[in-house]
Image (cartoon, rainbow, N blue to C red):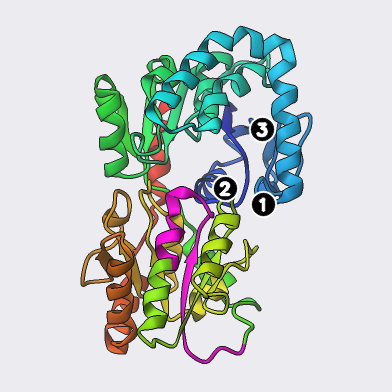
């Protein structure tokens, strides 16, 4: 029986983690012994792990990495790891050099700064694997490249590599040690190869796996909107981060309100930008119009009930949230950026807009005032086959 190790940074509620769970379900336990290591040992999605997957973490906390309790636990874990085996001292030259580079660029990304230290100080395993897979960039990739003993190694890229802020300097040659690199979309592949052109022959597209039938089943479960609002509802599912650009959406909501539109916008997600967004919402007087109810265990009833799904972000890899909304027949408005434009066919199953308050406002207004157009887009979206289990053959070919 072949042994496979998969490493991911955290197992919180997000797109890559959702896609990983589906990939794990498609690894036959009669053929493969599957181990999972969560680098930071945290995340609520662990409860959905298939029974045949063995979690290797000695310590694991199921709280969300975005909750107050989860953030406190994460800080403790990071500090413990930094001083384990003297990691912070051995990594000091690297950390200082990267911090100086970030300061010069005016963009400090603490997570990317610390990923290599987190990998260096993490739990180690003596056994040898037939295949080791880093399912995310950063820490997981560094860990698999440098600290895992495996016959074959693969890495997954889920983001626009350049936009996300990764670089050769941060990575220190980790992808040179990978036998195969899988990008979740063609645009993600192109972005990655701008940084690593020599990896062209080893890099291919591996589309996320998605259980569309399960999504439809869960959409029929109790839940969804429970307020008495009688106007049109807009929905977005995503973490409250800079990448998701919800500040632009808030300003677009202000334009909608000033134009007299009877509409309410709901964001299902949590993240470090909550405080800033709440302040902006108060400043613009949108407390009853732009709502942040937080992350929910089952967003699908909301998707099934919404009038319009909007995904206006700065960049993406390949958004699972868009695919879920399409599966449930949502009319969709997305910003014209990497990742998004690969998922929506303009004027066929959705609309692309500029990532500006005015661009979002015009797109929303058009769709809200054209019910037949929304219905047509929804039918086209619901009819898409968005996942093909044959993608697994690309990964399993490494075991041949």
Residue 123 visible in the snapshot:
no
Between label 1 and label 3, give the one nearer the viewer: 3
N-terminal label among 1 and 3 = 3
- Mark 2 lies on a secondary structure that is helix
**Residue 48: mark in rendering:** 1
Q: Which of 113 and 320 is in front in this view?
A: 113
Residue 264 visible in the snapshot:
yes
Query: Residue 356 in the image: x percent, y percent?
Result: 31, 62
On screen, 186 above or below 336?
above
Q: Which of 144 and 170 is in front in this view?
A: 170
Q: Which of 212 and 362 is in front in this view?
A: 362
- Which picture quadrant has residue 70? top right
- Mark 1 lies on a secondary structure that is helix
Quadrant where the image shows the C terminus = top left
Quick check: marks 3 and 2 in contact, CB under 8 Å?
Answer: no
Quick check: marks 1 and 2 in contact, CB under 8 Å?
Answer: yes
Between label 3 and label 2, give the one nearer the viewer: 3
Within-10-Å neighbours for mark 3: few <14, some 14–19, many 20+:
many
Which residue is denoted by mark 2 in the rendering? 21
**Magenta span:** 228-250
Within-10-Å neighbours for mark 2: few <14, some 14–19, many 20+:
some
On screen, 242 above or below 384?
above
Q: Distance between the residues labelled 1 and 3?
A: 18 Å
Residue shown at 51% from the left, 21% from the top = 142
Q: How far apart are marks 1 and 2 (CA)?
A: 7 Å
Which residue is denoted by mark 3 in the rendering? 40
- Mark 3 lies on a secondary structure that is loop
**Residue 168: mark in rendering:** none
């Amino acid at each position: 029986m072949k042994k496979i190790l998969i490493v991911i940074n955290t197992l919180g509620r997000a797109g890559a983690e959702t896609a990983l769970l589906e990939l794990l379900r498609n690894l036959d336990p009669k053929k493969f012994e599957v181990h999972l290591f969560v680098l930071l040992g945290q995340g609520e999605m662990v409860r959905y792990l298939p029974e045949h997957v063995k979690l290797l973490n000695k310590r694991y906390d199921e709280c969300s990495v975005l909750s107050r309790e989860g953030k406190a636990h994460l800080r403790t874990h990071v500090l413990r790891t930094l001083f384990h085996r003297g990691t912070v001292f051995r990594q000091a030259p690297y950390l200082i050099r990267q911090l100086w580079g970030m300061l010069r660029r005016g963009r400090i990304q603490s997570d990317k700064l610390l990923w290599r230290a987190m990998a260096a100080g993490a739990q180690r395993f003596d056994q040898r694997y037939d295949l080791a897979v880093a399912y995310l960039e950063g820490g997981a990739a560094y860990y698999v490249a440098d600290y895992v003993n495996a016959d074959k190694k693969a890495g997954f890229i889920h983001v626009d590599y350049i936009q996300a802020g990764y670089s050769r300097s941060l990575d220190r040659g980790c992808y040179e040690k990978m036998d195969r690199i899988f990008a979740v979309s063609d645009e993600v592949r192109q972005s990655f190869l701008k940084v690593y052109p020599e990896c062209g022959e080893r890099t291919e597209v591996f589309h996320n796996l998605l259980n569309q039938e399960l999504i439809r089943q869960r959409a029929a479960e109790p839940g969804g909107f429970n307020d008495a609002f009688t106007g049109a509802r807009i929905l977005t599912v995503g973490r409250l981060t800079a990448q998701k650009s919800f500040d632009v959406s808030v300003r677009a909501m202000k334009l909608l309100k000033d134009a007299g539109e009877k509409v309410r916008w709901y964001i299902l997600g949590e993240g470090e930008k909550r405080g800033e967004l709440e302040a902006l919402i108060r400043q613009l007087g949108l407390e009853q119009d732009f709502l942040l109810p937080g992350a929910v265990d089952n967003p699908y009833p909301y998707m099934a009930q919404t009038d319009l799904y909007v995904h206006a972000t700065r960049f993406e890899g390949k958004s699972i949230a868009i695919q879920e909304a399409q599966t449930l027949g949502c009319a969709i408005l997305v910003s014209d950026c990497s990742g998004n434009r690969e998922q929506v066919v303009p004027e066929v199953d959705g609309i692309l807009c500029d990532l500006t308050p005015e661009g979002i406002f015009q797109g929303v207004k058009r769709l809200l005032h054209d019910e037949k157009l929304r219905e047509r887009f929804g039918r086209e979206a619901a009819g898409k086959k968005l996942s093909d289990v044959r993608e697994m053959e690309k990964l399993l070919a490494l075991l041949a």
